[in-house]
Amino acid sequence: MAFCLLLLSVVAVTAAVPVPRTLTRAKWPDREPVVGLWVWQCLVATVLLCCLTALALGSAAVFGTVRAQLFAPAPPAVTEAYNLSAASPWTAVLTVLLACGAAWTAAVLGRELVEARHRRARSRALLRERAPDLPAGLPAARGPLLVLEDDYPDAWWMPGSPPQLIVTTGALQRLTDHQLDAVLTHERGHARAHHDWLLHLSTALATGFPRIPLFTHFCDQTHRLVELSADDTASRRCGHLTTALALIELNQHRGVLSCASSHRLLGERVDRLLEPPPRLGRRHRALTTATAALVPLVPLLITFAPGLLSTLP
């Protein structure tokens, strides 16, 4: 059992520190943002599974009631293979730390969901003020696309059930029909991929564990890659040049081509659309996706290995 906990700790530390730093220096996620998002999610899942399985083994070793419930369906040979009765003092300390970490993770995730719900409610209340419902008997003004009277050119997506696209009259006046189609396709890409849930998860983990490199990089890269992914969705439908021009027209008053750090991502997105990078081949994409999907299985294999070996003849 001590060997399993050691292996789980090594896998968790490896996935949480050196691998994310290497991945942030890689160039291929810019070419394949969807695959990049999948790899980051698999890394996070690996760390969380390592902590969860280590917490289960540690609790079974420290607390007899947990051991009885956890190994109740298993034959006696499986329980003996884990050697849970010989728990060392550091196992109890590790179990307490993991339990505190699990409670804190649940708390930060819950807080992020509650705050996101409040932000969404405030945004919808503001929308009702800016675009009130029409009197009874008149056609409804609401739907999947809402147009606001505003000279400020803007368009955004509001999550919900169903999600809603909002565009201002300023954007309608500035963009051509094809550019407007690119902007709306970009926002629909966010809605169809449910990027809001991914953003909530990455923000909560980065806020709750700011000193863990994986969660910090996961938050930064998620906010970046979801935009690149939506850009690709728009460019496949409307073309790279049209999407780039729409992005410039909609953001030039914000300094889209400036070198300021807050606008650097917009400039990178425009450059990427004007000069599309070479994409990974289908085989490389499939291999990367499959390899990333297998990584979260490592902590499960480590955890169940003693039990599986004990059942072999």
Image (spheres, grey):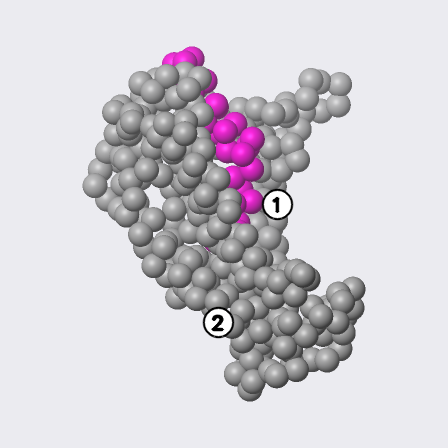
297 left or right of 274? right
Q: Nearer the viewer, residue 241 or 93?
A: 93
Task: Decide whether the magenta segment is chiefly helix, strand or loop.
Answer: helix
Q: Residue furthest bottom?
A: 89
Q: So how many labels did they put on this image?
A: 2
Image vertical order of residue 307 relative to residue 127, above or below: below
On whether residue 176 falls in the magenta region, the answer is yes
Which residue does the image show at 37% across and 17% down from the upper left?
A: 239
Q: Residue furthest front?
A: 313
The disc placed on residue 188 is none
Which residue does the image show at 71% across and 70% down from the upper left?
A: 77
Q: Which residue is mark 1?
A: 121
Q: Which residue is mark 2?
A: 6
Q: Does residue 176 appear in the picture of this structure? A: yes
Q: Nearer the viewer, residue 99 or 135?
A: 99
The N terminus is located in which quarter? bottom right
Which residue does the image show at 57% across and 24% down from the upper left?
A: 145
Please, what is the three-letter code of the amino acid marked with disc 2? Answer: Leu
Between the C-alphas of marks 1 and 2, the distance is 46 Å
Q: Does residue 226 appear in the picture of this structure? A: no
Residue 108 % position (x, y):
55, 61
What SS does tag 2 mark?
A: helix
Q: Nearer the viewer, residue 124 or 182?
A: 182
Identify the magenta region. 174-203
Q: Residues within 10 Å of mark 1 (few under 14, many from 20)?
A: few
On whether residue 1 falls in the magenta region, the answer is no
